[in-house]
Image (tube, helix red, strand yellow):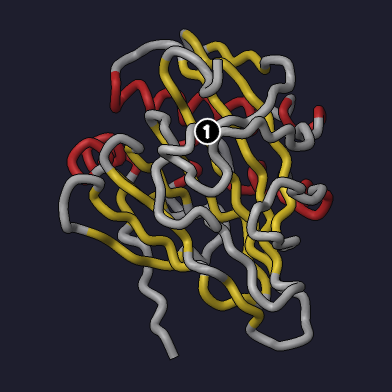
């Protein structure tokens, strides 16, 4: 049986330093309220959304294991504005499997993106990007994912180890049920150093400097055969200058 390694968690006051020095940082759920400035219960209030995600119809591996929603924002000077719904696009250099195509995912629910805790989370992630790159406007894409094991196996990153072509990537574990696997792997883009760990606690938050590290999550399988299993995440990217594809 493979061993699950715990995430190498840092404290909110050392988050910017860890991200700058190592290219990634992890906040444990217990540290998220201090960093966010809101209780974890407010984030938990978002969780029911993940039970209502429509299928991802663009999987080129033929799988039906992923459901998702998508929304885009611009954060500038402490202000957050949602932009009209748009396609998600990545170049093939960053996503060899799904790059080079416009993917029109279902929009996030309007009642979600107006929640104060949602707005706060987007602004705090923009702040983290500014701490890494300097203060500027950030073009934010948010993705709600559920990976399930209905077909026996689910792949969180079917494109394999990759970068996203942005400045900052944030991955929050929203929850997992009746699954094994889903190990997170982070590698230096220019070097040999790597880290592997499994996020098991809801609202564990991983931040990545996309220019410096490559990341992936391993497939998931059901713990108990014949019973539903899933892994829910929120992935948010911050990019300078424009959305990809503009």
Residue named by callout 1 = 90
For the residue labelled by badge 1, is the local secondary structure a helix, a strand or a loop? loop
Residue 89 visible in the picture? yes
- Residue 140 vs 10, above or below: the answer is above
Image quadrant holding the C terminus, namely: top right
- Residue 171 vs 36, above or below: the answer is below
The image shows residue 16 at horizontal and vertical percentages of: 28, 35
In the image, taking residue 2 as reference, residue 11 lies left or right, namely left
How many dots with numbers? 1
Q: In which quarter of the image is residue 102?
A: top right
The image shows residue 200 at horizontal and vertical percentages of: 51, 67
Q: Which one is in front, 174 or 62?
A: 62
Image quadrant holding the N terminus, namely: bottom left
Residue in view at x 30 percent, y 45 percent: 213
The image shows residue 226 at horizontal and vertical percentages of: 78, 86
Residue farthest along the bottom direction in this orientation: 1
Residue in view at x 70 percent, y 22 percent: 86
Q: Which one is in front, 242 or 24?
A: 242
Q: Quadrant of residue 103?
A: top right
The image shows residue 67 at horizontal and vertical percentages of: 74, 52
- Residue 190 vs 161, above or below: the answer is above
Residue 34 visible in the picture? no
Residue farthest along the top direction in this orientation: 77
Classed neighbour count for the residue bearing mark 1: other residues with Cα under 10 Å, few (<14), some (14–19), many (≥20)? many
Residue in view at x 58 percent, y 44 percent: 98
Residue in view at x 59 percent, y 46 percent: 234
In the image, taking residue 137 as reference, residue 119 lies left or right, namely right
């Amino acid at each position: 049986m493979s061993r699950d390694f715990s995430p190498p968690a840092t404290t909110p006051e050392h988050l910017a330093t860890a991200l700058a020095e190592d290219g990634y940082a992890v906040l444990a759920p217990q540290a998220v309220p201090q960093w966010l400035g809101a209780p974890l219960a407010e984030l938990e209030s978002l969780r029911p959304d993940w039970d209502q995600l429509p299928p991802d119809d663009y999987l080129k591996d033929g799988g039906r294991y992923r459901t998702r929603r998508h929304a885009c924002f611009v954060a500038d000077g402490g202000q957050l504005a949602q932009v009209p719904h748009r396609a998600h696009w990545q170049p093939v250099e960053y996503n060899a499997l799904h790059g080079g195509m416009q993917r029109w995912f279902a929009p996030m629910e309007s009642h979600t993106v107006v929640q104060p805790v949602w707005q706060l989370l987007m602004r705090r992630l923009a702040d983290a990007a500014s701490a890494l790159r300097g203060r500027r406007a950030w073009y934010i894409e948010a993705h709600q994912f559920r990976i399930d094991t209905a077909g026996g196996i689910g792949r969180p990153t079917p494109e394999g180890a990759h970068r996203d072509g942005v400045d900052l990537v944030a991955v929050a574990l929203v929850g997992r049920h009746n699954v094994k696997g889903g190990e997170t792997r982070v590698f230096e883009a220019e070097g040999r150093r790597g880290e592997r760990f499994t996020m098991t606690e809801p609202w564990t938050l991983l931040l990545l400097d996309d220019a410096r590290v490559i990341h992936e999550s391993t497939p998931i399988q059901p713990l108990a055969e014949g019973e539903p299993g899933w892994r829910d995440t929120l992935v948010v990217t911050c990019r300078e200058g424009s959305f990809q594809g503009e």
